[in-house]
Amino acid sequence: MRMLTLGVALAAGALLVLWVALGDRGAGARSDVRPAGERPAAEPARPLRDVELERRIAALELELAALRSELRALADSTTARTVPVLEQPDDELPVEGDERSPEWYLEQYLASFRDGGRGSEYFRLAVEAYAPALLARILPLVKSAGTLPALRWRLVEILGDARFAGSSQVQDALLAVLRTSDDAGLLARALASYEAIGDARATFALESLVWRLPAKPLQLATVQTIVRLAGDEANAALLRLLAGAPAELQPHLIASLAQTDDASALEAFRFASRGEVPLRLQAAQTLPSFRAETFRAFVDEWLSWERDESVRQALQATRTALDTLPAYHPEQATGPPDADPPTNDHPKAWATKTMDGGAEWLELGYDRPLRVTQVRIHEVCCAGAVSKVIGIEKSGERRVLWEGVDPTTTPGVFELQLARVSPAVTAVRIELDTTRRSGWNEIDAVELVGPDGRAWASSARASSSYANR
């Protein structure tokens, strides 16, 4: 509290010094009194130093207001403070003594768009900082088609703040924009903000409106947003979208299928196998990424009735590809390690589709349930990106076995000793943050060790793969 009070005092002192400095400059400029009746000379341009002083004063005013607000919150932490929605006209802006409320900053920001104004960046930053307190006033402006377009764009962008993650109110406002606007730029911004604050549950609302959006590029962008928000359930979402999708966009949905849900992917391929030639051809070309035995059987079944020669050729190439394990495929991480030497980028290890792309995962299945005391991860090329290890039981229940910072600095084995024996698992999920270690964070093999013995993985799937680039 004392440090915060000192911060307020220092900010106020700096503000006073700058005001005095700027005031003295102004006094000096006004000291030359003009004789009566003489026409005024043209107003000289303000020195750049004066402009800089005013900019710094404005910044200090905002910092001082924030510090005072924080000090009040600390002094009265047991009492919820709410600021009423203001009804005053512009010439009665709310000021409590020297303290400016969040609503005051919002009013100034709104005023900066009037009469053709382009909006003040200074007041935008203030509104963004106070956005949670101003939400009751921002949401109606976002929903209203009568709001100035430039202002509406900026407010929609503010709603993409992580502080609103999971907020149904904010999601509803952004959905209202997506349902009613025909402004492509505004729609793109609303979609980006919705993705930033949405979660897996938010995908259903997007699914209900995606094919009503005004432009195909926007529809495709919305599909990709659905895929990202849905996570492991992305294939199920794509399967739901397929039936209502325009025929020319259905191939794009098939191409977006991921190796996260084999059952939904197989149903999507069955749907595609009964479609028009472009859809069937895309499905046949996408199938090599899905290597489970059920997909091999489906390819053989499909070949028994397919009559189009181009599709048949694609299916036959797929059948051959399914018998050959591609370089960097997730299944390269099954079995014992075989990437030699591990210090180099190696095709016999799993690699993500892109380098340093952020969150990725590799999920490995084992032939029998095992209780685990140690997980041995063979890291290749660039080590140290593992962020979490999750055990998956036969029932599907998931438990975090370990989470933290991977200490591995050179390619080799990350030996993870668990604090206690885990319940029996049939799979483990290795999560990575590929921004932690620059380069290709590859995995060659993962061994489970415990009282039931040792085992190498027999199946694998991943968030992405360089094999599917």
Image (tube, rainbow, N blue to C red):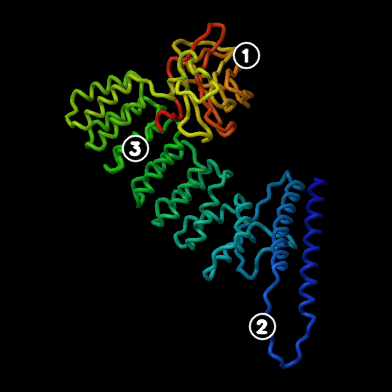
Give the amino acid type for the residue marked by disc 1 in the picture. Arg
Image coordinates of residue 34 in percent, x first then y, are 75, 87
C-alpha separation, residue under disc 2 versus residue under disc 1: 82 Å
Q: Which mark is residue 253?
A: 3
Q: Is residue 14 above or below residue 348?
A: below
Between 420 and 309, the one lying in front of the other is 309
| Label whose residue precedes the other's in the sequence (3 or 2) | 2
Point 67% across, 58% down: residue: 101
Image coordinates of residue 453 in percent, x first then y, are 53, 6
Mark nearest the camera among 2 and 1 is 2
C-alpha separation, residue under disc 3 versus residue under disc 1: 43 Å
Q: Which mark is residue 420?
A: 1
Check the image and name the residue furthest to the bottom: 37
Between 373 and 299, the one lying in front of the other is 299
Give the amino acid type for the residue marked by disc 2 in the picture. Ala
Query: Relative to residue 37, is residue 454 drawn left or right?
Result: left
Mark nearest the camera among 3 and 1 is 3
Query: Relative to residue 270, is residue 141 drawn left or right?
Result: right
The residue where tag 2 is placed is 42
